[in-house]
Image (cartoon, rainbow, N blue to C red):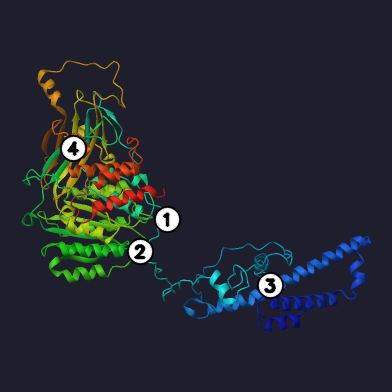
Amino acid sequence: MIEPDLTRLKDAPVPPPEGEAKRAALAAAMAAFEKSAAEAQGSAAPQRLSYASSPSEGKRKMRQTFYFNRALAASIAALMIGAPAAFMLSRNYAPGGGSISSPPIGRAAPPTEVAVAPRMEAPAAVQPAPAPSAPREERAKTAGALGGRADGVAAPPPRLAGSVRDGAAQRLSRSIQPAKPVAAMNAEGVRPPMSVDTNVAPESEFRDRFESKETNPVKSAATEPVSTFSIDVDTASYAFARRALNAGRLPPKDSVRVEEFVNYFPYDYPKPESAQTPFKPTITVTPSPWSAGNRLVHVAIQGYALQSAERPRANLVFLIDVSGSMSPQDRLPLVKNALRMLVDELKPEDTVAVVTYASGSGVALEPTKIADKAKILAAIDALGAGDSTAGAQGIQDAYRLAESNFDKTAVNRVILATDGDFNVGVTDQSELKGLIERKREKGVFLSILGVGQGNYNDALMQALAQNGNGAAVYVDTLNEARKALVDEASSTLFPIAKDVKIQVEWNPARVSEYRLIGYETRALRREDFNNDKVDAGDVGSGHRVTAIYEITPVDAEKKLVDDLRYGKKTPAPVAAQARAESELGFLKLRYKLPKEEASRLITQPIAESPSVESIAHAPQDVRFSIAVAAFAQLLKGAPYLGEYGYDDVIALAQGAKGDDPFGYRAEFVNLARLAKSARP
């Protein structure tokens, strides 16, 4: 093909689609090829056959030449049809509706993001086109393989996917999606943070981190009669699981902490009468609904609810993650709405400060009294997300502000709101825990407000909250924010006791074996119970805590732990023998008042006399909490439920919903239904 022919073809209009276009393009290509071949070879016939060794060989070579000519012509025709169309369409469909212009020489232009169809690798050599009878889509694929440049540099127009049969607009709608504009660099040559779709969280990352703990085992009362653990009032695990189930997925097993499921719900337990004795235990013994012959010992502990006049002043510092990962609506925007609601619950004499952190940290609001609420809300409204995360520096700045405004008669607390993605700066968990422990000893506590999923570091958030004498809550919706920071604001912010520990001693004469359901992350050694230097959980105003043990009586037919063959059985004193006839075990509760360092003790025997004949006769709150405990064990894959399944959980919970003003229990029943069909 000679230059004039190429020029004429370049300036020719794009022919109409379908048969007419193909015939015209094929004819032009064949004519150009024959002309160029004749000019290059001169008198064609003798020279074409001069290398043939036989007549048949010559005929074979002629056939090969003929079919190669047809294949090359078809490929060139498809290229002539597709390439101009692609070029015109790429110009007409630039982002924003304008055309794509070349950047000025000498200045780098920001890259334009174009979404294209999956890439097709071009073959090393030109392949023959399919026969005319081949499907139209196969011929289009062959044409697309010739769309690159000979010098190895990608051609500017994007490659089109699919057939060329439907015209320009239809081809474009199948193969190219509108690109999102990329921000240009500023005068200093620095590109501002890219805008992020704030409506959808990046859930495809699946980098959530949870601490892995084995389910509490069954223990023999004869060899290990004492069970000790720290109290826990966190609820993050339930809210995280709810989010997963509402999305049609089962939550990760390591994310399920049974005690946080059970303690998520409000219960109407008997209340204590004095802040000096801030807890009232209530014990109920009921048959196990999933293991015939076993019993459940339900320990309910209700905390004292501070009256408004008794509530101390609050000195709060909001430490807010404003890194790029916080952009979606379920993260920073949700945190801002939650903090606005909390501000509305505080008293005029309370103070609030705001510290933000990303690549660095900064003070967005110095300590300000709630009386100047407009200033506080304006500082919250001005928060925006961008950049990487340096959480450790932010924590240090927040503690500095809290200490500068420290009031020994007030509650001095830092509230960390984050998706847990600490990826820059000091990330060593032991170092962060050490910092928080030292500040806790000075009277500044730490609570966690977790948001988001995909990169949520639950393991770190739990460790920081536990070492900071605070609770860890997870907020996935505005309703959950209202529950945690409005309905339960006092229990979230104002402690009635700290370092609360529980110890139960089981009577081997009545109990063969036992297991504590949940509290795996809160286990303590037996000697830790009386050691006031050992840190434990805090309980806020009006909070309640539930612990459930499953026990196997000594006369049960089925046991998981066999009796010792060579165990010694010594006669018990008369008094001990009398107790053995009436007591299953003995409960001890140790705690410190908020401003004291010496612990106090509450004790209560676990008698069998108040036990109920069947689970159906148990109090309503007891039945519902047992249903929740069973549900969490199913999600976690605990091996102790036998044939007990989601339908059994639904039936037990449905009959124990009772008065449900906020719909929490009805929502739970629905989650149990969703779990039946959720994917792993």
Q: CA distance from mark 3 to mark 1?
A: 41 Å
Residue 149 numbered mark, or none: none
Q: Residue at x 64, y 74 (%)?
A: 82
Q: CA distance from mark 1 to mark 4?
A: 39 Å
For label 4, the residue is: 502
For the residue marked with disc 4, what is the amino acid? Answer: Ile
- Label located before the other in sequence (3 or 1): 3
Question: Between residues 56 and 351, which one lies in front from this camera angle?
Answer: 56
For label 3, the residue is: 78
Residue 450, quarter of picture: bottom left
Q: Residues within 10 Å of mark 3 (few under 14, many from 20)?
A: many
- Label located before the other in sequence (1 or 4): 1
CB under 8 Å between callouts 1 and 2?
no
Q: Provide residue 471's location: percent of width, then percent of height.
A: 22, 50
For the residue marked with disc 3, what is the amino acid? Answer: Ala
Q: In this rendering, which labeled residue sits more in front, label 2 or label 3? A: 3
- Label located before the other in sequence (1 or 2): 1
- Label located before the other in sequence (2 or 4): 2
Q: Residue at x 59, y 76 (%)?
A: 168
Position of 164 compared to 308: left or right?
Answer: right
- Label located before the other in sequence (2 or 3): 3
For the residue marked with disc 2, what is the amino acid? Answer: Pro
Query: Is 68 located above or below residue 22 in the figure?
Result: above
For label 1, the residue is: 205
- Label located before the other in sequence (3 or 4): 3
Q: Provide residue 156's location: percent of width, then percent of height.
A: 59, 73
Q: In this rendering, which labeled residue sits more in front, label 3 or label 1? A: 3
For label 2, the residue is: 328
